[in-house]
Amino acid sequence: MTTTTVASFEIKHHQYLDADGKPTQELPAFAKDMDKMRSLYRDMALLRAFDAKTYALQRTGKMGTYPASLGQEAIGIGYGDCLTADDVIVPYYRSTGGLLKHGVTMKEILQYWGGDEGGSDYSVAKEDFPICVPIGNQIVHASGVAKAIQIRKQKRAVVTEIGEGGTSEGDFYEGINVAGVWNLGVVFMVNNNQWAISVPSEIQTACETYAQKAIAAGIEGIQVDGNDIIAVRQVAEYAIEKARNGGGPTVIESVTYRLCDHTTADDASRYDNKDVKDEAWKNEPMVRLRKYLEANKAWSDKDEEAMNAENAKKVEAAVEEYMAIPKPGPELMFDHLFEELPEMTKPQREEAIRRAGGNK
Amino acid sequence: MTTTTVASFEIKHHQYLDADGKPTQELPAFAKDMDKMRSLYRDMALLRAFDAKTYALQRTGKMGTYPASLGQEAIGIGYGDCLTADDVIVPYYRSTGGLLKHGVTMKEILQYWGGDEGGSDYSVAKEDFPICVPIGNQIVHASGVAKAIQIRKQKRAVVTEIGEGGTSEGDFYEGINVAGVWNLGVVFMVNNNQWAISVPSEIQTACETYAQKAIAAGIEGIQVDGNDIIAVRQVAEYAIEKARNGGGPTVIESVTYRLCDHTTADDASRYDNKDVKDEAWKNEPMVRLRKYLEANKAWSDKDEEAMNAENAKKVEAAVEEYMAIPKPGPELMFDHLFEELPEMTKPQREEAIRRAGGNK
Amino acid sequence: MAAITLIEAVTAALAHELEHDKEVILFGEDVGKNGGVFRATDGLQATYGEERVIDTPLAESMIAGLAVGMAAQGMKPVAEMQFMGFIFPAMEHIVTQVARMRNRTRGRLTMPMVIRAPYGGGIHAPEHHSESTEALFAHIPGLKVVIPSNPSRAYGLMLAAIRDPDPVIFLEPKRVYRIVKHEVEDNGEEYPLEACFVDREGKDITLISWGAMMHETLIAAEKLAAEGIDAEVIDVATVSPIDMETILESVRKTGRVCVVQEAPKSGSIGSEIAAEIAEHAVMSLLAPIGRVSGYDTVMPYYKLEKQYMPTVDRILDEAKRIMEYK
Amino acid sequence: MAAITLIEAVTAALAHELEHDKEVILFGEDVGKNGGVFRATDGLQATYGEERVIDTPLAESMIAGLAVGMAAQGMKPVAEMQFMGFIFPAMEHIVTQVARMRNRTRGRLTMPMVIRAPYGGGIHAPEHHSESTEALFAHIPGLKVVIPSNPSRAYGLMLAAIRDPDPVIFLEPKRVYRIVKHEVEDNGEEYPLEACFVDREGKDITLISWGAMMHETLIAAEKLAAEGIDAEVIDVATVSPIDMETILESVRKTGRVCVVQEAPKSGSIGSEIAAEIAEHAVMSLLAPIGRVSGYDTVMPYYKLEKQYMPTVDRILDEAKRIMEYK
Ligand SMILES: Cc1ncc(C[n+]2csc(CCOP(=O)(O)OP(=O)(O)O)c2C)c(N)n1
Ligand SMILES: Cc1ncc(C[n+]2csc(CCOP(=O)(O)OP(=O)(O)O)c2C)c(N)n1
Ligand SMILES: [Mg+2]
Ligand SMILES: [Mg+2]
């Protein structure tokens, strides 16, 4: 050997619909199924309506800090549409779309952000993780779940999500690296919405793409237009199938833009650029999908109105359920600490109950 | 955009001398300077002699656990030869070669591994870090040092080292990532000696090369034949010059083989493969350099003998100095905890001194 | 001289040191343009530039490790952890490097740094945003752990922390970031570390607290006074190393003690104070030592946080129990 | 029945559970082919295969995080940290996930896992290999922290730890890995967690310890006996949550207490025990509560470790001081 090339890599970017909803290449079969595409559009609209309502609840003191998905709806709805009940989501705080698709209820999500652990006692997606707030942990958990699945020789995919900012945490890398070594069935969705609270992507990394971070784990990395639900769904489906069938892990970078504040506690006008945001609005995922539907005569203003009304009703119903949840009793601080409360802690439980006026 | 390639990368491998000491490509100028090459050979031999002696000290109870560099001598001596007194080394536990080249004394290294913090109170390389045992921390520290250097607008390079196993720690990635974002003047030496104690490289990562981990930080990654000191020195010099001059960070993977036990506390025969190790001995860095020197009529058996005698003397002198160090007094447990010992801890200091029989 | 809040006092102290010591460098997540999620560094990047007030990538181990590298070069890094709940990725650097570098090098390399973090409950924050884990850091030799309870102390103690030649974990009780204002003169005068503050003199019982809980404790003391119980109130301020002399002196006078803290009770700062009293002043005690604490359970999400955190009532009940003990 | 060492007892317990519960999975750095750097997992990969005894990449945060993922799927991961000094990268997972998952999901997902680590000083190890930081974990609600002091307890407590439905930090005092042998029957019988062991009954003073220090403590008790002082000796074993009843009962009997521990004194398990006594049995005390501890300084490199760690002499001196107190 002298000076030789010992490894080479390419990162591909996938897009099917441009910002005007025009196909940029031959579409996958599902994209030609207008029922499917309408239903994806409705899911995205529901998520957007749910977010807006939750924001409003927060502003009126009925909700805690909440992170919306405005502009990123195509991601969670896109991969969520590829999952079966057997698959596992290991979410972060901005995974509302994927969780809803997987059967977590709006009420549960409201309950969680409303400051009640009960919100993570999912009634349906019983193996999905609770929302991960400490950034990066979920990546390693997803690999752990996938390892259990692998040991048990099951055919189930694990999907986890992280923001582009979160990829700077060591856990992101540790989690994808072990997934590579062990060939685990995980799909790592990296949602590049350009911002980590106030920190722009160029301060997170010198990389041209986040997909290339996969190269450090020796695994496949793919970039998609995260505002194009066809691209997200198509690549996610490929990766999820691969994960289920022993094909190993994939990193998917979805390029998108956070059109809302980071959370209700944030004020993005302190740091973002209005022009850039205005531009970004032109790329947002719902308009493009609607244009595509309309071009295929699969959507009308009346459909839109009907859908909005229906979604509003669904959201309203969830909010009512949420508001009807009784305030958790103080015993709940103790009853799920361990399977059995230690002797030394029992008097504390009694004190807490007594001070709360003896509930339970 | 449709499906396009948005990024592509190549990892190069550099070798100048093959295992028989024959040039594989046009040699850099320094490699034709036989005085220089002889002196590098002597440095490597001294390191090997020092390691052997230290092992012997450990076996006779005069030394703690010690990690030798057997088979990896070209790395530390190679990059160490490119440094000036102004540069900073942030070492790990197997950085003996680099530290010796940078002025840390054999006595100090013995003192450190002999269980005495005084060994890290370097008399010469006053800004070099103490040896880092918690794997990965040094990578981030190196970026921190480089940031200070950048803020102060100095022209100084920082070099740090890590084993291939250590690259699995999140800190490795966090440290190289920030070096990329901030364009810091650090050289990250990844010593791929195939083993992390008993764990072979294929269990650390699915990557074909460790150099490609640089891609996840958006920085340059280069692979060298780590048994070829010409390749190590040539690429290290390039990266160090670049670091000094605002050119940013580089990851250098040196491919080598750990020919010794992990440390004196390890027994590699439990897990390694004799055949593979025998093969690896054929690639070790000193024979190849000696053959090159001999082919250039720059080395003889007599030179070898004289050198060995001289090195033995140097090592012996260091060992004598080491053995003459007085046992540290108990007050040293307290005197460098803070600049000033807290009131509450003073009685503890007195007690420790009293119990030790009142020294100091 | 202006009346300012605790967080404004933090900002003022940071600005003062940036202004007067060019080695002081601030960094962390969102500390730059955004001025921190609580605005503790508001305006500082605009004034002192992007090389002195730096937005970092999102990685706490890296933040602590960068501070180690910069401090070893003689700079004075002031690193922010966005919330104390996110300090744990940095734990390895804090325990094995920050706290030990001076000792590991026999004084050759030192760590004149501050790691700041907002901490504690009571602001309806999401999970992991409300814990009080100061005891973890107080148990690590080589660290100082400082917690201001009001604006003047935030200013004076922050100055002292930055100027201290050794590493300081500086925990800011975010519940009281904005609830009171003090007249604080921005004169660069520091308060001593490793010194308790006696905020109320009294002869019947010693109430000991720090941080946000000082507010409930002082209110409780006033209520006790109304009932004829004269409480001495001590703000520990530097919870490691603790100025035990001041505390012991008070206990020898009153014979009765109650520690008030937000953290879980087991293995807490309150436990350490009680143990020291049990070692050095046990025979002065006229009653058991009380610890009004968070419960030994996970800090709950916000719907239950009020039930978790000590209240004035709990302090009063415990103080009276101690007073009535025979 | 064979006489085995503490580390062999650990191995036996691990093997027993691997054999009888297919959900038990062991993993960590070098635990497979090499059988662990101390040989705690020696032979287990050969017997149970590479899917049950797994060498991981070198990353402790990952190790803990994988355990979280596997436990959530109902497996029983037993993860090794090669040394307790290297547990800190895993701190975030341990504090925010391992200790809380049950609570975070109201019992939906649980964490039936063990994190094992050799710990403590006295074997001439390199730096960061000798610390005793059990107090950090004991302060975290939701974790159990267990430390065996001898081979039988290592066996019985390890079984209990693996079978426990909640997470256990299992710390193995490596200084006594091989210094005594016990006859231990490999019968799968566990010892209770959350229970102290009274290893010597006595009426004059209560000596409380755990882990390796139990050895010095028991020797000290014999020496005290020779001088006519009848010490009760308690092995705490589960240092969180602590079985305070057993301890308080003893203190009420003897009126004199000394805790013996290797860790730094401030904010230690010893402090917690003293505080509990000061709360619940203070009026039974005839003397100050003693804490014979490591000093409040960084664990020194091995040349000084003997001077750092409590000795039989220090225990004797403190016990006598307490006995003589009037
Ligand atoms: C370990 C950790 N550090 C810091 C935070 C505080 N924090 C919450 S969200 C956020 C920014 C995340 O940005 P990104 O990963 O890009 O995700 P996005 O919010 O944009 O979806 C930060 C710093 C946290 N939750 N966890
Ligand atoms: C954080 C941390 N975890 C574990 C260890 C224990 N340990 C010491 S060396 C080693 C293997 C390192 O292998 P590698 O990084 O390849 O370096 P090499 O020793 O081969 O030079 C391990 C696991 C450590 N020192 N630090
Ligand atoms: Mg983002
Ligand atoms: Mg190696």
Image (spheres, coloured by chain):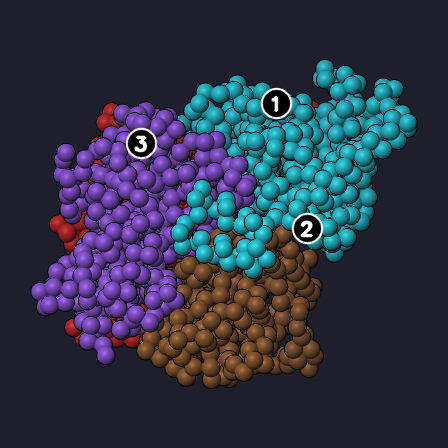
Chain colours: A cyan, B red, C brown, D purple
> Where is residue A104, by image quadrant?
top right
Identify residue type, mark 3.
Glu
Which sits earlier in the primary sequence, circle 1 or circle 2? 2
> Where is residue D264, by image quadrant?
bottom left
* Image coords of residue D144 (percent x, y): 39, 48
Mark drawn on residue A64: 2
* Image coords of residue B49 (percent x, y): 21, 46
Q: Who's the residue at 34% across and 62% down the image?
A: D273
Up-down relation of residue A211 to residue D133 (above or below): above
Q: Nearer the viewer, residue D133 or C52?
A: D133
Q: Dot 3, crowdedness within 10 Å: few (<14), some or many (≥20)? A: some
Q: Determine whether the residue tagged by mark 1 lies in a helix, strand or loop.
A: loop
Q: Who's the residue at 59% across and 81% down the image?
A: C226
Question: Badge 3 sits on which subunit?
Answer: D
Q: Dot 2, crowdedness within 10 Å: few (<14), some or many (≥20)? A: many
Up-down relation of residue B4 to residue B228 (above or below): above
Kindly report the distance in space between the C-alpha atoms of the residues bearing marks 3 and 2: 44 Å
Q: Which residue is mark 3?
A: D17
Answer whether residue C271 is visible to the viewer in this image. yes
Circles 1 and 2, Cβ within 8 Å, touching? The answer is no
Q: Nearer the viewer, residue A150 or A104?
A: A104
Identify residue type, mark 1.
Thr
* Left/right of residue D48 with respect to residue B240 in the rendered view: left
Q: Are marks 3 and 2 on the same chain?
A: no
Q: Which residue is mark 1?
A: A84
> Where is residue D153, by image quadrant?
top left
Q: Quadrant of the N terminus of chain C?
A: bottom right
